[in-house]
Image (cartoon, rainbow, N blue to C red):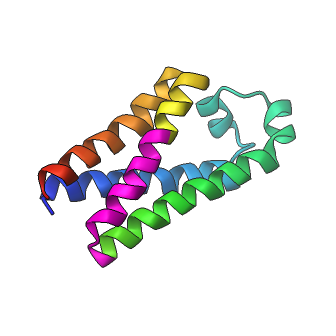
Amino acid sequence: MSILATVFVVLVMIEHIYILILEMFLWTSPNTRKTFGTTPEFAEASRTLAANQGLYNGFLAAGLLWGLLSNQWDVKVFFSACVLVAGIYGGLTVKPRIFLVQGVPALLALVFLFLSR
């Protein structure tokens, strides 16, 4: 696998570990509320929902880690594609910035994965 493919897969994995931490453990903190544009009341009311989302982001990161450690191209492609789909969906239904932050790095990972095949 090319170095760029590895770099982007690692970047996407780290990003999703970071999102897991924000959504599962720091959801009601002032900095996380500012990042997601939520009020204290909304953050408290949606704490369990956010933790659930964080867990899913952790599964995406775990899948990418599995692909990296096992050096299985198809595993990296599958989990990168899952992140891309989530980024597209979030960009269309929540705010376009989600596609830029999550979808674009995943798309670049996929491009470099396919170029390295």
- Quadrant location of the N terminus? bottom left
Q: Is residue 74 left or right of residue 64?
A: left
Q: Nearer the viewer, residue 63 or 21?
A: 63
Examine the rendered structure and indicate whether residue 23 appears above or below residue 87: below
* Residue at image location 35% in from the left, 69% down from the top: 67
> Which region of the structure is painted magenta?
70-85
Q: Residue furthest bottom?
A: 70
- Quadrant location of the C terminus? bottom left
Picture coordinates of residue 78, whole percent (x, y): 39, 57
* Residue at image location 51% in from the left, 26% down from the top: 91
* Residue 54 on the magenta span: no
Question: Is most of the magenta stretch helix, strand or loop?
Answer: helix
Examine the rendered structure and indicate whether residue 10 appears above or below residue 107: below
Picture coordinates of residue 102, whole percent (x, y): 43, 39
Q: Is residue 49 left or right of residue 114?
A: right
Q: Nearer the viewer, residue 26 or 67?
A: 67
